Amino acid sequence: MGGIEFSSLVSIATIGLAAATESLTWYEAPAVVAAMCASILIVRCGRPFAHFLPLAKRLVPAVGPLIVLVMTLASSLVAQRAHLPSGRLALICLAGSLGIVLLSFRRRPRRKAVRIALLGNAELVTALTQALAVHPSAGQIVGYVGDRSADPIESHDHPLGPKSELPAIIEHNGIDLLLVSSEEARRAAFELLAANCLDMKVRVLELVSFCEETFGLTALAAIEPRWLESVLHPSYQTGIPRSKRILDVVVSLVAGLLALPVVLVLAALVKLDGGPVLYRQMRIGERGRPFEILKLRSMRSGGEGEQWSSRTDPRVTWIGRLMRRTHLDELPQIVNVLRGDMSVVGPRPEQPALAEGLRSAIPYYDVRHLVRPGLTGWAQVRGGYAGSEVGSALKVCYDLYYIKHRSFSVDCVILLETVRTLVFDRQWQNTGAHRALAFPANVRVLSNQTTPFPRTSSI
């Protein structure tokens, strides 16, 4: 049983114990039942996404027992008998949440490594091996099924045999999972498996889906046009949902009030360096529409421009370096959120000149413009600064994953993890291994792919 599944049972048991030991009134009992359902829903919805994030992975399950406190207080307010929950009820719920957090640190039992074979593009073996090196529990690459490459890969050239011998290869090498990296390979795999080895324990999965479930990104190195079905499907919601806009306004107002003293102090320090306090720059927003973004100036006056920036950029001032590390230079963008130019969570907006170059080099780059850009996002808590074309390709991998899976629960998980990135500068860990899935050394992904909407002349 996984850690989050076990934690959900602890949440339910804690709330049940609170209900059994607390003398509940007629209006508090339904609140406890609702809290049980809410805890299950939160854990289940947040599980796939919190798994990739260090802080959210530990805290999302722990939210369950705390919900009963909120529900009980809310029911009291509705009944016009406002009071705080009793000390006994609060103690039980807090102890349950703390227990869940402590359980998340326990050592997980070792499992037999999943043996994986790749069917299709042999060059992707190198990229997948590098990415799995930092995720050994996800499995190990045994090799690839297909014809031997005319230009073999020096470090990870492990041909297992031709496609026609797929059943024998699976049995001889003990393959548990077969990854298919193209539509042609997918069709061939199912034809061979249907004819010869339906009784085998091997499972088949598309490489793009495997990368989404294992690494939390959509691998551009393996993506195909059929992926667009996920964002062009009739059930996919375009535009900004009402719940997301409410979250944007509430978070922006609360964060703005709390950050106002910090902004005033930082503005005074920036002013001491000379030049304007605010830096205004054109960025590309939803549906490719340009807008003016606001930031506290972090570079020397006149040093800004449409070029790549990094953590060690020499143009950055001393106070700018501190602001960039903690992302405090982006606090004025709360105004952009209230205006409706941005959202709290979404892909980061790019400069027009850089965006024009990236859209011609990175496939499906325009898909990130389907949603409103954000202050923080999945790419920010997972990948950090781009700094280059390859870094931007990796961020697009994360953006595509978010656009496909975006929801209210995902936004809440990202907001929770953003707190960690503001304090600990660890959002760039394992980036090198994942970059191989964006632009592998032996494969140059195609550009000028079909995009969901035509390019506009305004950018």
Image (spheres, rainbow, N blue to C red):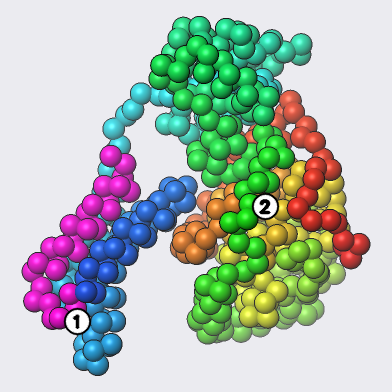
User: Which of the marked residues, 1 or 2, is nearer the chain's N terminus?
Assistant: 1
Q: Amino acid at mark 1?
A: Tyr
Residue in the picture at 85% in, 50% down = 357
- The extreme right residue here reads 457
3D distance between C-alphas at marks 1 and 2: 45 Å
The residue indicated by pointer 1 is 27
Q: Position of residue 277 (x, y in %)?
A: 73, 80
In the image, taking residue 181 as reference, residue 104 lies left or right, namely: left
Q: Which residues are magenta?
A: 1-29
Q: Position of residue 458 (x, y in %)?
A: 89, 65
In magenta segment, residue 17: yes
Residue in the picture at 53% in, 35% down = 210
As helix, strand or loop, the secondary structure at mark 1 comes to: loop
- Depth check, mark 1 against mark 2: the one in front is 2
Evaluate if marks 1 and 2 touch, with contact meaning CB atoms under 8 Å apart. Answer: no
Q: Mark number for residue 232?
A: 2
The image quadrant of residue 39 is: bottom left
In magenta segment, residue 26: yes
In the image, taking residue 230 as reference, residue 177 lies left or right, namely: left
Q: Is residue 255 above or below residue 371?
A: below
The image quadrant of residue 262 is: bottom right
As helix, strand or loop, the secondary structure at mark 2 comes to: helix
